[in-house]
Image (cartoon, rainbow, N blue to C red):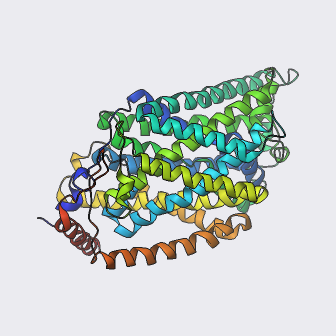
Amino acid sequence: MSTFDSLSSPSEKYEEEDLNRSLNTRQMGMMAIGGAIGVGLFYGSSGAISYAGPSVLLAYALAGAAIFVVCRAVGEMATAEPVSGATVSYASRYIHPFVGYAIGWTSLLGCVAGSGAEFTALGKYVQFWFPSFPIWASGLIGMVLMAVINLISVSFYGESQFWLSAVKVVTILVMVVGGLIIIFTGIGNGGDPVMFRNLTVDGFMPNGLTGLLFSVVMVAFAFGGSESVAYTAGEAKDVKKTMPRAVNGVFWSIILFYLGSTFVILCMWPWDRMKGVGSPFVRVFASLGIPAAASIINFVIITASLSAVSSGIFIYSRQLYNLSLQGSAPSILSRVSKKKIPYVSVLTVVLMQLLGIALMAVLPERAFALFSSITVFMLVFSWVAELVSEYRFRGIKRREGKENELTFKLPLYPFSNFYALAFMMLIMVMMAIMPEYRISYLVTIPWMILLAVLFVLQRRRNGGKTEPVSGGDSGNSTPVNGEDALKDTLSDEGDASNADS
């Protein structure tokens, strides 16, 4: 076996997945666009604007460029080696088995934090119509509905995400077009075209560089889930065609939906009047004279929240499933149903979401801030792993003379990769400075130490080896390639590290 044979072999040699490839181009394209649009855009944009003023446009542009690099990086690997575990699988083979192990098990913490944040938001929006309805009850109902969708079939999940994403896309398009009409014609503003005066009245960067940097963290939270389409690679039809189209759709989501909608909002109102006014989208729709504007946006935000919850169930369950196939999680997590759904992993994720709902019920006021700060940390950790994995993946392909065989390459490699990594480091530094986000380190650092200890103990118990397994309908997992295959992989990782240095 050559130095890098095991590292560059098809993904099926590592994890023999037993899932259906039934997601089509239409579903994946809308999922990619919708995945880049979260609750943070509809509701959280006012917070970022209050920090940076008009310069939040620069924050969105810089963050958007970095996130698109992440999407292209993981898309490059997913097109060449399509597995449902995505980041878990690539980090394990191209960085170190512990990194994949940490990402996979950290997904459980992500289940609690991410779902808790979404369920808190969901409950508050339901209370817009039903003020006395408990937030935790809304979260529980939403969780059950999304769990059922994920357990039926992957094609049913894809179709539900298509329509949930379509609602978000249509709403933002209407908002951007309608807002531009108001800005340039004055319709809905007493006939007074506001043009661009609100962008410059206090200067482009009224709070200086500090305000811009503080807004970066909130902007990053809004982009969470942009790369989620990569996790469909193991269940997509004709992945070499569908994946590039889906990933490239993220670029237009960033340009049109984030930059476009924020530009409209900043033009229509002074930036210093945005904090504490709720969703800016409601104000735009109301200015357009659309009846029940608040109710419409409230409904859209609820669908966005449900879409995020469903996507979380899908992503985290596939991470656990892949981790099980690697032998780094109980084999029961690799069991699949007759519809080829990793149902044990799905139910495990749902149980963790229940914990998130419970915590939300105990400390509702602090839950969202705590959960959102932890979620940002998890997102950045995953993004960094994807970037480093792609850097090593491409380097291996180049040394083997197989780089030209890649059909969907990250543009401007390695400089684009370095830019995105530098941006991620900036987010981590700003999180340590900002008190409301600093708390995430108090949770995640002990968590990582615990995972490191458990990883070492597991490796010692297994004699320094982990056996990859294959999934099956019955859940009776069996070793694939045995200890020798993994020994080759670990040995080659060491060779690759030596070669890199």
Q: Nearer the viewer, residue 323 or 331?
A: 331
Residue closest to the far left: 1
Q: Is residue 461 above or below residue 301?
A: below
Image x and y of residue 264, in percent: 71, 34
Q: Residue at x 79, y 34 (%)?
A: 268
Image x and y of residue 353, in percent: 59, 52
Quarter-of-image position of residue 488:
bottom left
Q: Nearer the viewer, residue 418 or 356?
A: 356
Quarter-of-image position of residue 435:
bottom right
**Is 1 left or right of 302, judged from the image as shown?**
left
- The N terminus - image quarter: bottom left
**Is 36 left or right of 393, judged from the image as shown?**
right
Q: Residue at x 59, y 62 (%)?
A: 427
Q: Is residue 438 visible?
A: yes
Residue closest to the far right: 190
- The C terminus - image quarter: bottom left
Image x and y of residue 436, in percent: 73, 64
Q: How many marks?
A: 0
Q: Residue at x 61, y 38 (%)?
A: 306
Q: Residue at x 35, y 49 (%)?
A: 335
Q: Is residue 403 above or below residue 187?
A: below
**Is 241 left or right of 272, judged from the image as shown?**
left
Quarter-of-image position of residue 378:
bottom right
Q: Is residue 215 visible?
A: no
**Is 22 left or right of 45, judged from the image as shown?**
left
